[in-house]
Image: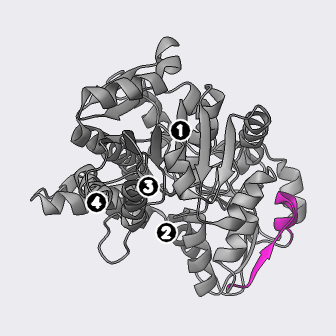
Amino acid sequence: MKLAFIGTGYVGLVTGACMAELGHTVICADIDEDKIEMLKKHVMPIYELGLEELVRRNVKEERLSFTTSIKAAIQESDAVFNAVGTPEDKKTGQADLQYVFSVAESFGKYLNGYKVLVNKSTVPVGTAQKVSDIVRKESKGKFGFDIVSNPEFLREGAAIKDFLNPDRVVVGVSSEQARMLMEKIYRSLARAGRPVIFTDVKSAEIIKYASNSFLATKISFINEIANFCEAAGGNVKEVAKGMGYDARIGSRFLSAGIGYGGSCFPKDVKALIQTGAQYGQAFQILRAVDTVNDAQKMRPVEILKKQFGSLEGKKIAVWGLSFKPRTDDIREAPALLAIKALVLEGASISVFDPVAVENTKKELRALPIEYAKSSHAALKGADALLITTEWDEFRTVEYAELKRLMKGDVIVDGRNILDRNEAEAEGFVYHGIGA
């Protein structure tokens, strides 16, 4: 089928390239001329394992193309995927839907026959109806259309794998015609045994928020338990292991640390809270989840202040800047909040991350930060090491080399990726999160 993706951000680019890999003819469109020129030259605007190879192959085989013409992308396609950003409105906490509505206006304006507009972006319940109203107004009733909700569940760093081998594909439709078209789009995944679940549109919109909010809840819960372990005695790693063997609970998302970040969990939790308020639903659990997460991000600073008293003049080496490994995404990353707080406390900061340095330089350009070229280079003369992202290369350390490079002997392991006994046996003062 002929598909268009409006918006070449993380979701639009990855999903568009993967759809081309399934055999569809895909046009990825964006109003950002510089980004489209980069993509035409096979330069990826985001870091995602395997994406460049996927794009190159499908462009070469003429299944994938890039354009700045929104009109052409819409009119040449059977289905149009709305994949623009829905950033958090800092004033209200709700999702900012201006870009989603702008695409809806273009879709209605350029509609030249029956098509479906698929909301791939994460949007609050009821958005499909608002989009439908906009399209109907702009199209003046000349052609039929349907609005479909098809939320994405891609993990940054494993997005291609997640698309091609999904736990489930959720599709919210309001007509049999739209259902049949979406069945064609996802037929190859269904034939491979992947669950393609059809629901009503509102349920599909809620599923996305409910899923992310539940996972965020597990994270904040285990972080509360980790803090309790520190106070009462116990090891949160052992507690999580004992919990995880219960099939009703499961082991995933029970890794204690310094909180969640990224473009989804923080934004989606806040958005669901605000949407709930519009319907008279307080979402007391989610409010606590959000509060716990905000506090958890400051745990490393609290630990370091307790260890040193004053951080004035102390050098802190920070390993990890992205909110999670295998991505250069620093949105809502706990590392950035910790760095800002440490600078305010008078500490000097040296940092290293395998891929997220350039994004961090733009975000923290006003702060006096030393950007090291390697993890070891960041350690030179440091009084303490703070680990904020669980990159694989940080999991195995040569403690003798750390001793040689560092001035001090303090390790704050914000992701519990090192072994306390090993670190202490080598003469380090080790602080984990409940472990």
Q: In this view, does 214 lie above or below 271?
A: above
Q: What element carries label 1?
A: strand
Residue picked out by circle 1: 3
Q: Which of marks 3 and 4 is nearer the N terminus?
A: 3
- Asked if labels 3 and 1 touch by Cβ distance under 8 angstroms, the answer is no
Q: Look at 58% across and 86% down and name the residue there.
A: 344
Magenta residue check for 296: no
Mark 3 against mark 4, which lies toward the viewer? 3
Residue picked out by circle 4: 134
**Picture disc at residue 298:** 2
Mark 2 against mark 3, which lies toward the viewer? 3
Q: Is residue 417 above or below residue 283?
A: above
Image location of residue 115, percent across then percent down = 39, 40
Q: What residue type is labelled 1?
A: Leu
Q: CA separation, marks 1 and 4?
A: 21 Å
Magenta residue check for 375: yes
Q: Look at 63% across and 33% down and name the residue there.
A: 20
**Residue segment shown in magenta:** 367-380
Local crowd size for mark 4, using a 10 Å CA cut-off: few (<14), some (14–19), many (≥20): many
Q: Earlier in the sequence, mark 2 or mark 1?
A: 1
Q: Which amino acid does label 3 sit on?
A: Tyr
Q: Which amino acid does label 4 sit on?
A: Ile
> Which residue is situated farthest in the left direction here?
280
Along the horizontal axis of the image, is 152 left or right of 348? left
Q: What residue type is labelled 2?
A: Met
Identify the coloring. Answer: one colour
